[in-house]
Amino acid sequence: MSRKFSDGRLVIASHNSGKVREIGELLAPFGVEVVSAGALGLDEPEETGTTFVANAELKAHAAAKAANLPALADDSGLAVDCLGGDPGIYSARWAGPGKDFAAAMALVNDRMGDSPDRRGRFVCALALAWPDGVCETFEGVVEGEMVWPPRGAQGFGYDPMFQPQGHTVTFGEMEPAKKHEMSHRADAFHKLVAACFQR
Ligand SMILES: O=P(O)(O)OP(=O)(O)OP(=O)(O)OC[C@H]1O[C@@H](n2cnc3c(O)ncnc32)[C@H](O)[C@@H]1O
Ligand SMILES: [Mg+2]
């Protein structure tokens, strides 16, 4: 049995405004009172884990302890098949300290060269931690292909170069509600809700 989230405030343990927005949209139907790590002035912990789940856990624990509230963290990224799963857990770091995702997308495209295998996937690990150290984790994925040049200004990060399987538009071209029907984040979120939000 998973620990259930009961009423009260929930910290969104992320410093990425795109993610905070999407998590807020996904949580909206549940009437949860959310507060972001940024609004609480929480530090951004160093992501020393070797998996998405480990990094999500580390971020959720750090925020739950610092805020003395339950905290939800997201560690996510883009894994490209012909790059052996890169940039993977290093997806944010590929954009450099200036968070330049135009440059990060160009780097992915350069490294892929003319490989005939254009497959990639977004992965999202969510961790919900409590101040007493209990933590529940969930993983979601969406398969797709990498396109070039990037298309669209919706979403964030690598969205303009990712076209989900069975679709002709990129996540950068999709309305937020449509992305939430299929994204890695929504996939992980549905598992979280089923385990921790049902009464
Ligand atoms: O750690 P926090 O503070 O949550 O923010 P971050 O941006 O550093 O987040 P991650 O460490 O999880 O790095 C994930 C990166 O992968 C990319 N990414 C994750 N989800 C994405 C999505 O839905 N669309 C596009 N890019 C995404 C995005 O560029 C993120 O910066
Ligand atoms: Mg990060």
Image (cartoon, rainbow, N blue to C red):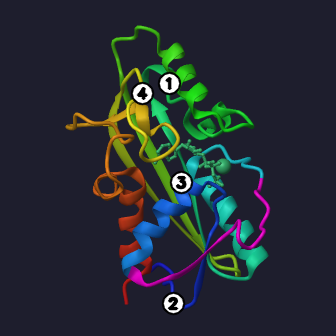
C-alpha gap between disc 4 and disc 2: 41 Å
Which kind of residue does numbered mark 3 sit on? Gly
Query: Mark 2: few, some, or many residues within 10 Å (few <14, many ≥20)?
Result: few
Which kind of residue does numbered mark 1 sit on? Gly
Q: Earlier in the sequence, mark 2 or mark 3?
A: 2
The answer to whether 184 is drawn above or below residue 145 in the figure is: below
The answer to whether 186 is drawn above or below residue 144 in the figure is: below
Q: Position of residue 41 (x, y in %)?
A: 78, 69
Q: Is residue 137 left or right of residue 40?
A: left
Which kind of residue does numbered mark 2 sit on? Ser
Foreground residue among 105 and 48: 105
Reply yes or no: does residue 102 show up in magenta: no
Give, as a single range, the part of the protein colored magenta. 30-45
Residue 178 in sight:
yes
Reply yes or no: does residue 41 show up in magenta: yes
In which quadrant of the rendered image does the N terminus lie?
bottom left
- Tag 1 secondary structure: loop
- Tag 4 secondary structure: loop
- Residue at position x 53%, y 27% from top? 105
- Tag 3 secondary structure: helix
Q: Is residue 58 left or right of residue 175?
A: right
Foreground residue among 86 and 102: 102
* Disc on res. 18: 3
Residue located beneath label 1 in the image = 84
Q: Earlier in the sequence, mark 4 or mark 3?
A: 3
* Disc on res. 150: 4
Residue 187, picture quadrant: bottom left
Residue located beneath label 2 in the image = 6
Q: Is residue 49 left or right of residue 117?
A: right
